Image: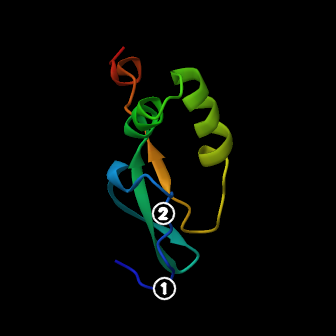
Amino acid sequence: MSDELEILKIDDYDDCVIGIGQTWHGNMLVDRLIYDGEKMLDKMEENGMSRDDAMEYMDFNILCAYVGDSTPIVLWPVPEELLDEN
C-alpha cells in the first residue's frame, strides 16, 4: 500500500468497508477505501430512513462528494443483465 496520502473514511460506516483499492494518480499510487453500498443503505434503513430517503442521501452526500485523490469508492453488485452473454 502507498503511504503518500492519508486514506479518507466515510464517518460512521467503518463496518461497511470491504477493502482497499489502489489507483494511479499521475505517477503516484493512491489507496482508496471501498465500501459496500448495499450495506450502507441497509444501515441507513436500520437508523430509521426509508430506502428512497437513504438512496437520496447517498446520492447527494456520499456519491457526489469528491474530496480529493483518495475519495472513497462505493461498490455496488453487478446487475445480472450486464453479465449475460448474448
Front position in the image: 4 or 8: 8
Where residue 77 appears, as percent x and y from the top left, is 37, 32
Where residue 59 appears, as percent x and y from the top left, is 63, 37
Say whether residue 70 is left or right of residue 79: right
Label 2 CA crowd tier, 10 Å (few <14, some 14–19, many 20+)? some
Say whether residue 26 is left or right of residue 40: right
Front position in the image: 70 or 62: 62
Residue 63 circle label? none
Q: Residue furthest top?
A: 86
Front position in the image: 73 or 62: 62
Where residue 78 appears, as percent x and y from the top left, is 38, 30
User: Residue at the spot x=47%, y=72% of the render?
Assistant: 7
Q: Nearer the viewer, mark 2 or mark 1?
A: 2
User: In what element is the residue under mark 2?
Assistant: loop
Q: Residue furthest bottom?
A: 4
Q: Which residue is mark 1?
A: 4
Residue 9 circle label? 2
Classify 81 as above or below 38: above
Q: Residue furthest front?
A: 48
Label 1 CA crowd tier, 10 Å (few <14, some 14–19, many 20+)? few
Q: CA distance from mark 2 to mark 1?
A: 16 Å
Looking at the figure, which quarter contains the N terminus? bottom left
Looking at the figure, which quarter contains the C terminus? top left
If you read the primary sequence from the N terminus, does the residue marked by circle 2 or circle 1 appear first? 1
User: In what element is the residue under mark 1?
Assistant: loop
Question: How many dots with numbers?
Answer: 2
Say whether residue 15 is left or right of residue 26: left
Classify 24 as above or below 17: below
Classify 56 as above or below 4: above
Q: Amino acid at mark 1?
A: Glu
